[in-house]
Image (cartoon, rainbow, N blue to C red):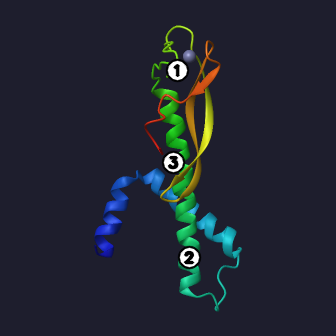
């Protein structure tokens, strides 16, 4: 894929406002790394590339966490206790917990609804057979 088509695809992913904020984020991250005076003459392309790659992975993990929280909050899913079968509708109490998950970009804390069955005093994830297992 050539540079032109890559740029075109990235532009179409973002609104002009989002594109501007994205560019600001890029500038912020490079300033954080190299200071207000920028790169030294000795900085190699391999060093720049490695930093950019790590920043991309950091962004990927942050997005994974954010999207998982949104999904856990927006898509309530009724659940039954796997031990006694009590249903989420009646007496199973839910809360939100996080658990570590290995993603393509490294470890994140995945937010999920967790249910506690008052009969068994057992915590369980309704999506235990879903993401990450
Ligand atoms: Zn139970």
Which is more N-terminal, label 1 or label 3?
Answer: 3
Residue contact between numbered discs 2 and 1, judged by CB atoms under 8 Å: no
Cα separation, mark 2 vs mark 1, equals 48 Å
**Circle 3: element type:** helix
Residue 24 seen in render: no
Seen as rendered, the residue at the extreme bottom is: 42
Q: Residues within 10 Å of mark 3 (few under 14, many from 20)?
A: some
Q: Position of residue 53 (x, y in %)?
A: 53, 70
Residue linked to disc 2:
50
Q: Is mark 1 within 8 Å of ligand 1?
A: yes
For this orientation, the residue located farthest to the front is: 83
For discs 2 and 1, the disc positioned in front in the rendered view: 1
Classify mark 2: helix, strand or loop. Answer: helix
Tell me what residue is drawn at x 64 percent, y 91 percent. 41
Give how far across and how far down residue 110 sits, in percent.
56, 42
**What residue would you read off at disc 3?**
64
Position in image of residue 109 (x %, y %): 60, 45
Q: Quadrant of ligand 1?
A: top right
Q: Residue at x 49, y 22 (%)?
A: 82
* Mark 3–mark 1 CB contact (< 8 Å): no
């Amino acid at each position: 894929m050539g540079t032109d088509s890559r740029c075109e695809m990235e532009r179409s992913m973002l609104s002009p406002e989002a594109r501007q904020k994205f560019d600001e984020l890029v500038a912020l991250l490079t300033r954080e790394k190299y200071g207000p005076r920028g790169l030294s003459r000795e900085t190699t392309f391999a060093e720049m590339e490695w930093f950019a790659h790590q920043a991309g992975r950091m962004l990927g993990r942050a997005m994974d966490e954010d999207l998982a929280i949104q999904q856990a909050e927006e898509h309530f899913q009724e659940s039954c206790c796997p031990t006694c079968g009590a249903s989420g509708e009646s007496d199973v109490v839910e809360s939100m917990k996080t658990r570590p998950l290995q993603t393509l970009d490294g470890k994140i804390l995945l937010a999920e609804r967790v249910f506690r069955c008052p009969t068994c005093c057992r915590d369980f994830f309704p999506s235990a057979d879903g993401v990450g297992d």
